[in-house]
Image: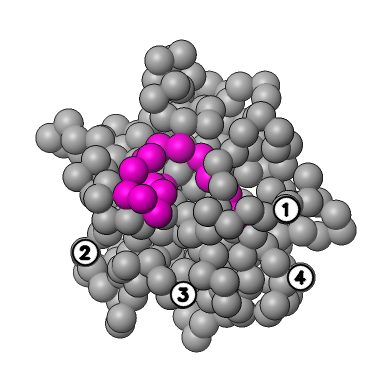
């Protein structure tokens, strides 16, 4: 991996040439997909990569588990990609730097309610620009976790800016699913669907298992969450697409009240 310095940070339906980057299951661990050119989160990080990024265990109706990523935006509320939670029978958040340790130490909180953007599916087909969802937890996150501010304006992030990506996807060697990693990457601008693009010249980026994970950008010295990972090419050597949070403020606001999420 390439060392970086930070300021103290499949689903199978295709959309054009882009494939949704789905949750990471054990059967995929030989694929070599990863947070590219990133590093593990250790006890030395204090930014949102460590204190606001949360792992998800999603379980289908057959009892098979996969891993996705999310971010804390209220002490009991996570934001993620819709394709991470759509169709799954059970969703559990895990807190810590890796899934196995979180399970062993029982640092787990199950989902109470899930809200998927109403425009995410049209006639049963995933609609990429609306790949966003909220998860209300049954209890508050541990006190070492802090909600991150939701970005309200994409114009505050400019092409060429370095942004912070985080997620629980696997490493370049094909293992390590469920370990939290992060990287800086270059923001490239919006595509014609309003999604945020990462097309980094040093091939830094995200991939399978990092789905739903955050794109953080600095505003006045503080990180905000500007996007959640939706898709990219397989294998992950090209552009990543993040659903814009600012483009979905109405959905987020309508579901942020504790009595509104459904």
Q: Which mark is residue 239?
A: 3
* Helix, strand or loop status at disc 2: loop
Cα distance, mark 2 to mark 4? 33 Å
* Helix, strand or loop status at disc 3: loop
Residue at the disc numbered 4: 156
Q: Residue at x 34, y 43 (%)?
A: 175
Cα distance, mark 3 to mark 2? 17 Å
The answer to whether residue 182 is magenta is yes
Q: Is the Cβ of the residue at disc 1 closer than 8 Å to that at disc 3?
A: no
Q: Residue furthest left?
A: 62
Judging depth in this view, the residue of 113 and 157 nearest the camera is: 157
Mark 1 or mark 3, whichever is nearer to me: 1
Q: Is the Cβ of the residue at disc 2 closer than 8 Å to that at disc 1?
A: no
The answer to whether residue 30 is magenta is no
Mark 3 or mark 2, whichever is nearer to me: 3
Q: Which mark is residue 213?
A: none
Q: If you read the primary sequence from the N terminus, does the residue marked by circle 2 or circle 1 appear first?
A: 1
Cα distance, mark 4 to mark 3? 21 Å
Q: If you read the primary sequence from the N terminus, does the residue marked by circle 1 or circle 4 appear first?
A: 1
Q: How many residues crowd around disc 3 within 10 Å: few (fewer than 14), some, or many (20 or more)?
A: many
Q: How many residues crowd around disc 4 within 10 Å: few (fewer than 14), some, or many (20 or more)?
A: few
Residue at the disc numbered 1: 5
Mark 4 or mark 3, whichever is nearer to me: 3
Residue at the disc numbered 2: 12
Cα distance, mark 2 to mark 1? 35 Å
Judging depth in this view, the residue of 98 and 252 nearest the camera is: 98
Cα distance, mark 1 to mark 3? 22 Å
Residue 217 position within the rendered picture, expressed as x and y whole percent measured from the top left: 70, 60
Q: Which residues are magenta?
A: 169-183
Q: How many residues crowd around disc 1 within 10 Å: few (fewer than 14), some, or many (20 or more)?
A: few
In the rendered view, tell whether residue 159 sits above or below residue 174.
below
Q: If you read the primary sequence from the N terminus, does the residue marked by circle 2 or circle 4 appear first?
A: 2
């Amino acid at each position: 991996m390439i060392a970086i310095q930070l300021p103290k940070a499949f689903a199978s339906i295709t959309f054009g040439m882009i494939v949704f980057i789905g949750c990471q299951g054990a059967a995929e661990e030989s694929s070599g997909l990863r947070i590219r050119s990133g590093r593990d989160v250790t006890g030395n990080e204090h930014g949102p990569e460590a204190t606001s990024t949360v792992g998800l265990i999603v379980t289908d109706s057959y009892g098979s588990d996969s891993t996705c990523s999310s971010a804390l935006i209220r002490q009991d509320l996570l934001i993620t990609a819709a394709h991470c939670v759509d169709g799954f029978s059970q969703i559990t958040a895990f807190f810590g730097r890796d899934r196995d340790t979180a399970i062993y130490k029982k640092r787990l909180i199950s989902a109470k309610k899930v809200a998927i953007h109403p425009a995410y599916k049209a006639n049963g087909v995933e609609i990429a620009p609306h790949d966003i969802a909220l998860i209300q937890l049954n209890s508050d996150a541990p006190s070492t976790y802090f909600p991150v501010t939701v970005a309200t304006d994409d114009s505050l992030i400019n092409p060429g800016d370095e942004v912070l990506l985080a997620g629980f996807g696997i490493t370049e060697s094909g293992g390590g699913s469920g370990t939290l990693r992060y990287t800086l990457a270059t923001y490239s601008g919006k595509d014609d669907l309003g999604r945020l693009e990462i097309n980094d010249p040093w091939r830094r980026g995200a991939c399978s298992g990092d789905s739903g994970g955050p794109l953080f950008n600095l505003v006045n010295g503080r990180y905000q969450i500007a996007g959640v990972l939706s898709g990219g090419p397989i294998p992950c050597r090209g552009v990543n697409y993040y659903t814009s949070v600012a483009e979905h403020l109405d959905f987020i606001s309508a579901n942020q009240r504790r009595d509104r999420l459904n």
